[in-house]
Structures are given as C-alpha cells and as structure tokens.
Image (tube, rainbow, N blue to C red):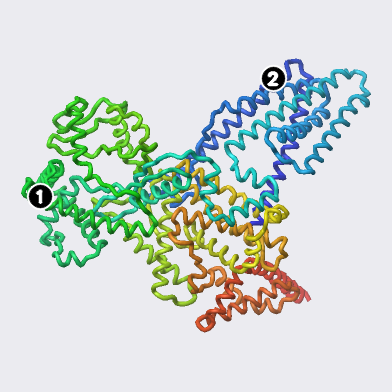
C-alpha cells in the first residue's frame, strides 16, 4: 500500500511538472504572438494575468464551500441521531490573517510582470524564456541574506551553471544575430529588463516565503527538515526527551496568565452522564495544557446542589416514597447505611425521574414541593441553624438530606474522576451563594436597576440590556433567587466556563449584568468555552445513560474482543483490568476526537473493531513499536548514547514514507500549540490517529532486524520518536490513565496478533506447496521456518508459554518480511498454475 502511494505521488508530480512546462511555453509563445498586434501589450497582458490569478480565488472559495458543506453533512445530526460516527478532519475554515500582508508581494508581482512583458516586446521568445531562469539566482541570494537559508553545495553549483547559461544567451543575441531588421539596442534593453524583472520577482517570492513560514509552517519542522543531519538531531531530541510536551510548548513563548477554569459541574444526587464527562475531559485537558504552557491555573468543580429540583426530590423522598401504587420505596435506615455510594446515587437518580413525572401529572405535588423550596431558601437566607428557628421542620429535614446527598455525591464523583485522572483545586457549589445572591438582588432593586415584570412573569428582573438579549429574571415575586451571578473571588485574567452550548444566553446575560453594575472589565474576562451535546440523554425523562452504565456496557464489548484475541485463558483480575482500560480509552477517545461544537450519539458499536477508527489503532501501533524496541534493545542503547557529532554524521535513508512520518513527528509541537489556542484536544487526537496510520504504512518498508547499523540506527531512531509522541499524546489526552499498555504482551500474559494468527492459518493450507517450490530466497525460507515453529508452539501454548513469548516478540519484527514473502509465494503459485494450465492445453492439443 505504501509503495502504491509513493508511486502515485511520483506520477502526480511528473504530470504537474510536464503540465507546467507545456503551459509555460505556450504562455511565452502566445505572449510573443500578441506583441505583433497593435495595442498596449504589457499593461493589458498584466491585467489578463491578474484576472486569471483572481479566478483562482473564486475556485478556492467554491472548493472551500463544497468541503465545508460536506463536513457539515458528516458532522450535523438530524432526527434519528448523528449522520457520521467520527470525522477526523477539522472543520474547513477560511484562514484568518490580514490580507494586506500580501500587498507588497502583489505589487512586486504586478511590477515584475509588466517589466517582463515590455522586455518580451523587445527581444526574442527564446531569450525571454531562458532569461527568466535568472530568478533562481536572485531568489537564492535573497533567501540566504534575508531568510537565513542554508544552501548546499550542489545548489550553488546549479546557480552557477544557470548564470553561465544566461551569459551564453546574452552573448548569442549580440554576436550571432544575423537579422538586419533587428534593433540590437532594443534586444539588449529587452534582455536587461527581463533580468531586472526577475530581481523584482525574486523579492516577491522571498517575501511570500517569509509570510508562509511565519503563519503556516511549523517552526521545528522548518529547522528540522532543512538538512538531513539536522533531522536526526531533531528526532533524537523528541525520542529521548524527559519532558516532551512542556519543552515543545515552551518554544512558542506564551505569556503567563492567571486562569480560573470551571468545568464538570455535575448535579448532586444524580449519576454522572456523558454530558458531564465531555465537560470534564475538555476542562481537564484545558487546565493541563495551560499549566504546561506556564499559566497559573485554578480549577473549580462547581456542583449543582441547589434549586427547586432538589426540593421536589426531597418532598418525594420524605412524603411519597412508600412503595405503594408502583412508587419507589424508600430504603430503611439500616438498608441505606449498607448501600455503597454508587447504589445510593443510582436510587436518587431513579427517585428524581419518578418525582419529575409526578410533578407533571399532579399539580398538588408540584405546588407543595415548590412551597418546600421557598421555606428551604428562607432558612438559608435568614441563617437558621436549628429546627426551632426554622419555619418548617420538613424544610429543615430536607436541608439535612441535601447536605447528606452532597457528601454521598462527592465521594461517588471522586472515585469516578480518579478513573480518568481528573483533579480539582476547589470544590464549590450553588448553595454557597444563596445569601450573597439575595443581597445582590436587594441592592439592584434599591438602586432601581431591577424592575417588576408583567403579572404573567411574576418576577423581578433586568431589561433594556444589549440588543438581542431577552429580559433577565433575577427574583420571583415569592422571593426565590434564580442562580445567575458568581462572586469574583480571584483576581484572574480570564474566567473560563466549560459548559455546553445551550447555556450561551446565560453567559450573555451574565456579561450584560456585570456591565450594568460597572464591571465591564470583568465581563470581558468571562469566557464561555462551549461544546456540543451528547444526544438522547435526559435525567428528567429517565433516559440518562450514566457513565457507570456505559462502562459496564463497554466492558462486555471489550471482554468479547479480548476473548477473540487471546490464545490462552487469563485470570479474571487481568481481564477486568484490561476491559476497564479499553473501555475508558474508548470513552475518552469518542469525546476528544470530535470537534467541540459537534453533537453526537455515543455507542460502543464498532468500538473494538481492529480495522475501525477507534482507540485500538493507537494502542495497537504503540504495542508494535514497543515490541520493536524490545527486539532491538542494543540499537536503542546505542541511540541513547550518541553524541551531537554522531547525530550530525548520521545520514538517514528512510524513504518517502519515512520522511512523511518524520514530518508528522516534528509537527507535533505545532499541533500542541494549535490545541492550546483552540483549547480543545481534538487536533491532538486527530494527529495521533494520522500518526498511527502513517506508522503502519512505514513499518513494512523500513526493516531493522538484520540490517547494517548505518541503516538500522536511523530507522530505530525514527520509530522511537514516533512511539514517544504517540505515548505522550495518549497519556496527555487521558486515553490511557496509566502508561499505555502493551496489548500484545500484558504483564507477561501473551497473545498472538490477529494478523499473525490469520497468516499462520493460511500457512497451514499452502505450506506443502511452498516447501515444494524451487527458487525461493533465503529470506523466505527463514520466514517459513519461523512460522512453522510458531505454529507448533501456538498449538501447545499452555506447555510452552515462555518459548511462545520469545517467538512472538521476534514475529512482530518479521511480520512485514513474511507478508512480502507471501506475495512472492503467491506469484510463484500463480506461475505454477499457469504452467499447469499450459501443459494441460498442450496435452489436449496433442
């Protein structure tokens, strides 16, 4: 496959080069033909050229519109769910830059083209075409002077030969022109004008290159791939860095800021669902990458622990849960104590769904739960700290329940957060701001900033804010405060809220209120980092797919995958550990690989297919690179101890695919910076998937085992750097909470890769034919012996586990060699079949 891609690339480049030569020649000849007509040639020709270039912009915009529409079709969802399960491409966007930065090169282009066409009017078409080559000389000199480019010897030699050719062309026009009608002075002037025009064009090219380098090309790539010896040094720094991601981010020189990041923020007394997990993983990624970039970060988990929904649940819990008429029965105190936090939260979630259904059907229940909330809030505002001071003993009991539920929920959440490596600096909650919120609204009413809305709204609020904003209710007439404000505790540069996009109006209202209070600077610091929804989740309707349930479902799928993959039985503890790892990786991958604004339906369907686009591709490629390192530990030690001088002497022969892989490795710093600027992990996740695919394409063509050191070491360095980037990326995005596990060898328990197993089975059917085939290479015969040995060991793995493990490690490095051998065998077998057919035809004719 890799060779086919390389071949197609070469054919494409050959076609482009041929097309450029043909159209360039036609351009010159047609321009010379036009010179014979009577009109202002140079200016008109330049205008025509610029119109043609402007048409390129139209084509680009059309292509951009088509790509964007196709992307939206893949990423939008309609009734019935998401159209596409996963799209690895970023949303096509027009690049953001000041278009006037290209004004100087555009002016140079116009001036240079006009001068060239004036020169073409005075000289011959052949001289014009030859003298245009002088742009190579001037571009090289200007690149060296202004871009600090390093030109190798053969490039200087080429420039010298071009200069010599130009000299020959100029002299031939002067000495060997036999046409008496030609004006020699005009020819010389024309030639000089063409050369001057090439100086202007060279200035244009160098300035354009400067802008391209500044805005598009990765800095490490621009340096690392300029010279081959520098490539080895760059890969070595990546492969053996002890702090890779911070080192890469440090190159961009981000100015340190203080950031407050509010994320996750689940409701208490409810199971943790996929929407919460999306906010958690996004927010945790943001706090991690910002810390590594040098920012001071305060992470906050702002729990939803206050509101009418909790009074409704408390009233249902205290007065309704009797187990009669199909209602949920409240557990006895002893039974409640024996339940773990997970079971308690699940029961509270079910009770909340039942209470919500009852509130829709029973007006009396809804009114009484509402009254209970008013009494609870009065206790919080008035500071009642005992039952005697409370206006309602039931309200006081409900507040105690709410306090207990919060403690249960925090314990439950901390266990779940630990699975994904998430930590918070501060745990906060809505209930801590009831009194402050009430005082704030009192102040705004007193100052006349709040007005009473019409009778049908029955509340006080704010109107006449920014255009397009609806009125903001702050306090109902009955006295209940609606959550809208948060006290500014931190003197931060930005306050980032990682909340789904349905809350956009809330943050618009918050900014408007802050501006009304005179806190415009604070309003500008409020950042709503929005993201899309996970479709089909609704706690109120009882449809909530909790993360616990999804993990249980994923464990079943991953268990089935493991049973198909393993060649021996593993203990229950090992299977449970691996199931948890695969499930959590896939959960995280399904979230972080998507653009943050996309809505999607989550499912484990196809999540553990080896050929699918899922977290398995990352784990599998990491595993293969890990096996490659184990099989070549001597090479690895030599690479670690190489000096800078040794690296500079290294001449990597890694082929086209190897160079593309190296480019992707060295682009990782720019990918990290892109993720930092966007504050989302999808660029990293997508890059890791593409890197994994490129690793798979490159491994077959760059063999290490048995190769001389001059080839083996650069290749080993390339794959070690690839493994470093892949592993660090997986850990950083929390696709592996611990060090990425070797799926092929897990703590001494061995399995054969599916691909190797399939080849072994296939070998059983053709082994007889192979052994009788003459003319096989030594490599093929060695591969056959290895497969026969491994096949026999695999059949008796229980008795030969240690020997099998060693053979499998060797197999991983020889798999690609064997696949190539199979291609040879297939060709030989086809030739043999063809000979047999010819013999049978000959016998029939005879």
Inter-mark Cα distance, 2 to 1? 92 Å
Residue 836 image point, x, y percent: 72, 74
Contact check, label 2 and label 1, Cβ < 8 Å: no
* Residue 123 left/right relative to 492: right
Residue 405 image point, x, y percent: 21, 55
Of marks 2 and 1, which one's residue comes earlier in the chain?
2
Give whichever of 51, 367 is nearer the camera. Answer: 367
Residue 384 image point, x, y percent: 11, 45
Compared to residue 783, the image places residue 319 above or below, namely above
Give whichever of 119, 500 is nearer the camera. Answer: 500
* Mark 1 surroundings: few (<14), some (14-19) or many (≥20) residues within 10 A: few
Q: Quadrant of the C terminus?
A: bottom right
- Residue at the disc numbered 2: 44
Residue at left offset 76%, top offset 76%: 843
**Res. 637 mark:** none
Residue at left offset 89%, top offset 26%: 173
Q: Quadrant of the N terminus?
A: bottom right
* Mark 2 surroundings: few (<14), some (14-19) or many (≥20) residues within 10 A: few
Give whichever of 401, 26 is nearer the camera. Answer: 401
Compared to residue 720, the image places residue 767 above or below, namely below
Compared to residue 57, the image places residue 592 above or below, namely below
Give whichever of 569, 406 is nearer the camera. Answer: 406
**Res. 386 mark:** 1
Camera-side mark, 2 or 1: 1
* Viewer can see residue 678: yes
* Residue 369 left/right relative to 210: left
Residue 418 image point, x, y percent: 36, 58
Say which quarter of the image contains residue 15.
top right
* Viewer can see residue 1: no
Label 2, secondary structure: give it.
helix
Label 1, secondary structure: give it.
loop
Residue at left offset 37%, top offset 52%: 601
């Amino acid at each position: 496959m890799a060779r086919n891609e390389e071949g197609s690339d070469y054919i494409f480049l050959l076609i482009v080069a041929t097309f450029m030569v043909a159209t360039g020649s036609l351009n010159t000849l047609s321009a010379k033909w036009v010179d014979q007509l009577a009109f202002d040639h140079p200016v008109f020709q330049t205008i025509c050229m610029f119109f043609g270039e402007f048409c390129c912009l139209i084509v680009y915009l059309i292509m951009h519109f088509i790509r964007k529409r196709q992307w939206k079709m893949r990423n939008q969802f309609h009734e019935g769910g998401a159209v596409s399960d996963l799209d690895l491409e970023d949303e096509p966007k027009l690049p953001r830059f000041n278009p006037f930065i290209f004004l100087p090169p555009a002016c140079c282009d116009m001036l240079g083209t006009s001068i060239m066409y004036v020169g073409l009017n005075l000289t011959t078409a052949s001289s014009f075409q030859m003298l245009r080559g002088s742009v190579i000389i001037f571009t090289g000199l200007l690149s060296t002077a202004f871009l600090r480019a390093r030109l190798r010897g053969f490039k200087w030699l080429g420039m010298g030969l071009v200069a010599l050719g130009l000299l020959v062309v100029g002299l031939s026009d002067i000495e060997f022109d036999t046409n008496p009608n030609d004006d020699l002075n005009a020819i010389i002037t024309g030639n000089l004008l063409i050369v001057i025009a090439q100086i202007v064009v060279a200035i244009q090219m160098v300035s354009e290159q400067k802008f391209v380098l500044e805005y598009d090309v990765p800095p490490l790539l621009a340096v690392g791939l300029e010279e081959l010896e520098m490539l080895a040094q760059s890969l070595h720094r990546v492969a053996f860095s002890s702090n890779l991601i911070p080192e890469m981010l440090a190159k961009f020189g981000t100015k340190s800021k203080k950031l407050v990041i509010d994320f996750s923020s689940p409701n208490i007394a409810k199971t943790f669902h996929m929407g919460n997990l999306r906010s958690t993983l996004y927010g945790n990624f943001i706090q991690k990458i910002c810390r590594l970039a040098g920012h001071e970060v305060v992470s906050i988990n702002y729990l939803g622990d206050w509101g009418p929904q909790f009074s409704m649940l408390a009233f249902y819990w205290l007065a309704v849960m009797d187990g009669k008429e199909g209602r949920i029965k409240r557990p006895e105190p002893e039974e409640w104590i024996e339940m773990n936090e997970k079971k308690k939260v699940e029961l509270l979630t079910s009770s909340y769904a039942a209470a919500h259904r009852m509130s829709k059907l029973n007006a009396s229940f809804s009114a009484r739960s509402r009254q209970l909330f008013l009494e609870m809030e009065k206790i919080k505002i008035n500071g009642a700290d005992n039952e005697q001071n409370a206006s309602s003993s039931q309200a006081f009991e409900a507040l105690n329940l709410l306090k207990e539920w919060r403690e249960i929920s925090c314990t439950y959440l901390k266990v779940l957060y630990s699975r994904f490596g998430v930590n918070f600096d501060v745990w906060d909650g809505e209930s801590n701001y009831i009194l402050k919120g009430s005082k704030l609204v009192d102040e705004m009413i007193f100052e006349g900033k709040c007005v009473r809305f019409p009778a049908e709204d029955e509340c006080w609020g704010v109107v006449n804010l920014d255009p397009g904003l609806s009125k903001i209710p702050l306090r109902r007439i009955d006295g209940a405060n609606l959550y809208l404000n948060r006290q500014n505790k931190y003197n931060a540069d930005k306050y980032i809220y990682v909340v789904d996009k349905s809350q956009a109006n809330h943050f618009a209202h918050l900014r408007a209120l802050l501006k009304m209070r005179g806190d415009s600077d604070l309003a500008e610091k409020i950042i709503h980092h929005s993201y899309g929804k996970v479709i089909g989740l609704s706690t109120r309707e009882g449809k909530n797919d909790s993360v616990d349930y999804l993990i249980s479902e994923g464990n079943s799928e991953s268990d089935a995958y493991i049973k198909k993959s393993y060649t021996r039985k593993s203990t229950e503890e090992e299977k449970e550990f691996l199931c948890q790892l695969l499930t959590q990786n896939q959960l995280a991958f399904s979230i972080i690989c998507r653009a943050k604004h996309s809505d999607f339906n989550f499912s484990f369907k196809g999540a553990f297919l080896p050929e699918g686009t899922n977290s398995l591709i990352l784990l599998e490629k990491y595993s293969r690179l890990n096996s490659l390192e184990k099989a070549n530990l001597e090479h690895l030690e030599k690479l670690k101890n190489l000096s800078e001088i040794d690296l500079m002497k290294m001449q990597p022969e890694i082929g086209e695919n190897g160079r593309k892989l190296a480019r992707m490795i060295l682009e990782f710093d720019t990918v990290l910076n892109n993720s930092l600027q966007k504050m989302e992990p999808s660029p990293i996740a997508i890059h890791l998937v593409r890197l994994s695919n490129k690793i798979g394409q490159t491994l077959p063509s760059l063999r290490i085992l048995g190769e001389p050191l001059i080839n083996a070491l650069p290749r080993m360095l390339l794959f070690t750097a690839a493994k470093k980037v892949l592993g660090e990326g997986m850990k950083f995005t929390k696709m592996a909470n611990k060090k990425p596990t070797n799926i092929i060898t897990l703590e001494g328990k061995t399995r054969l890769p599916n691909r190797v197993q399939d080849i072994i089975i296939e070998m059983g059917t053709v082994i007889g034919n192979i052994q009788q085939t003459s003319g096989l290479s030594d490599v093929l015969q060695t591969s056959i012996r290895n497969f026969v040995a491994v096949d026999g060991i695999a059949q008796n793995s229980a008795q030969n586990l240690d020997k099998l493990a060693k053979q499998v490690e060797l197999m991983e490095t020889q798999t690609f060699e064997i696949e190539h051998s199979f291609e040879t065998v297939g060709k030989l077998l086809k030739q043999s079949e063809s000979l047999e057919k010819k013999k049978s035809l000959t016998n029939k004719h005879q």
